[in-house]
Image: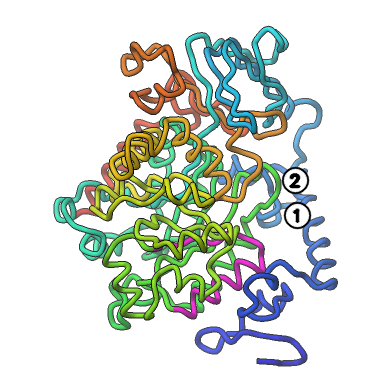
Amino acid sequence: MRIGGRSQIQGFAGIKLPFLRRRGLKSPADKNQGHHNRTRKCAVKMESHDRLRRSLLKLPLLAALPAISSAKSLPLLSDNTQPLPTGNSMERTLLLKNAECVVCMDADRREIRNASVLIKGNKIVEVGEARSLPDSADEIIDLRGHIVIPGLINTHHHMYQSLTRAIPAVQNGELFNWLTHLYPLWQNLTPEMIHISTQISMAELMLSGCTTTSDHLYVYPNGCKLDDSIEAAALMGMRFHASRGSMSVGKSLGGLPPDALVEDEAAILKDTQRVIERYHDDSHGSMLRIVVAPCSPFSVSRELMKQSAAMARSFNVSMHTHLAENDSDIRYSREKFNMTPAQYVEDLGWVGPDVWHAHCVKLDQHGIELFARTGTGVAHCPCSNMRLGSGIAPIRHMCDAGVHVGMGVDGSASNDSSDMMAEVRQAMLLQRVGFGPDAMTARQALELATLGGAKVLNRDDVGTIAPGMMADLAIFDLNRMGLAGAGHDPVAALVFCNPGQVAYSIINGKVRIRDGQVAGIELPTVLRQHNQLARKLAG
């Protein structure tokens, strides 16, 4: 509709969506170009807004968010806040010296033996043979007998589900059965539960080599907010893509979730805009980005999918949802929309390099070709797909077609683990079961979890060990029982064998795990709290 010479979208409950007016989006039907365009007036306003936000970088961050790399998305701080110290405090050097092997995942896929990596501040400045790099730095870690890889990237998770692992009633159910039994438990989630479960999930991920993670939070009962996850991530120091999920179609409207667990669509859009404006940081090396993420075709309306896409593109943020996970998912799409899942998301404009879909186990040939042509990403979750009996996703076929594929652990209750390296191994093995013993090599599987994940999340600053990239590294001790006898190919051994937990994890230039110990939190205390809350939630 046209009002006052401007195009507006009528929201739910008669609410006009201000983000479209402010960002200059022409209409939700403009799927491919409108979301990338800005009017001159809007550009000037945004430039001014960004200058204001950048000025906040001179101020220390809120105590609740110590690890976020930019203050551009935080509220204004008090007048008595003191500036950050100047000098070289942010340019400390860290030398990772004499590693058995550094797996670069660069354009040449270099694997450098007897190698070192020099880090300055939060970036990699040099990588190469140890003899070619300096011998001095502010801190030196001797990595004889260790292998260094890019930090693994988790593209799909539901961290709150670490509270409902191995619930007896859902141990043997498929997706829809599993969900309908767990929804009543999730109705009792609290902000404290979201915070603690995020910390535990991230600790588990970090210990398995993960340095960048997404999380798809789509349930918000009892005052829960995405902020609860964001604050926990800041404490853990992980690079975080926080997805503002949503469910709006309950049982009474033909959806799967109970009505008590869905939200009003106008409220969903309002809160999504709030967290984008407050937290999203699209700068190079950002520690925190917001993702717009309606849960699934069977839990949100067509209109919410369209308006969510319009909002995401008006703010230039990524979009994420579940798609084509199992046979029930396919059947629902055909009965409800008279379309395949791929046809449905194409019709809604939910394809493109700013979109990635979780699972895609049952993605058909049309869908694979569509995703390859449009740059749409896939989060592959092999353990979850096996746990729920969903099937074998045709990942080999997707990769050959040019689809961007990353790895995801999925929810801790549909996997019962959050081990990224175990996920890499399972991806390799499952493709071999489905498509032959040469369907996926160890190195190809490792690439999905590094470079592949970076492409899916639209990042060009992680996933590779190279000068100018962010210093996100996972380091494994090769002298472990699980790797005994595999020294002739330590890279493949990480995937074929059992590398165990990392010896070191470096995120944004900071050592977050040292000698297997997680820095920054009292893990035994948090674990105890987590288990108490899990017992309370399960009843």
Question: Is the residue marked by circle 2 packed among few (<14), some (14-19), or many (20+) residues within 10 Å?
Answer: some
Compared to residue 403, the image places residue 239 above or below, namely: above
Q: Which residues are magenta?
A: 302-323
Q: Looking at the rendered structure, which numbered label has been put on residue 326?
A: none
Amino acid of disc 2 = Leu
Compared to residue 356, the image places residue 253 above or below, namely: below
Amino acid of disc 1 = Arg
Report the residue at 35% width, 72% height from top: 298
Classify mark 1: helix, strand or loop.
helix
Question: Is the residue marked by circle 1 packed among few (<14), some (14-19), or many (20+) residues within 10 Å?
Answer: some
Report the residue at 29% width, 82% height from top: 252
Q: Which residue is mark 1?
A: 53
**Residue 529: in sight, yes or no?**
no
Report the residue at 60% width, 41% height from top: 66
Q: Which residue is mark 2?
A: 57
Mark 2 near mark 1, Cβ–Cβ under 8 Å? yes
Task: Check the picture and name the quadrant holding the C terminus.
Answer: bottom left
Whether residue 122 sits left or right of residue 82 in the image: it is left
Report the residue at 51% width, 76% height from top: 347
Q: Alpha-carbon distance for marks 2 and 1?
A: 7 Å
Q: Position of residue 322 (x, y in %)?
A: 41, 61
Residues 108 and 449: in front is 108
Residues 311 and 196: in front is 311
Q: Position of residue 464 (x, y in %)?
A: 61, 33
- Most common secondary structure along the magenta stretch: helix
Classify mark 2: helix, strand or loop.
helix
Task: Check the picture and name the quadrant holding the N terminus.
Answer: bottom right
Whether residue 403 sits left or right of residue 530 in the image: it is right
**Residue 521: in sight, yes or no?**
yes
Q: Position of residue 348 (x, y in %)?
A: 52, 75
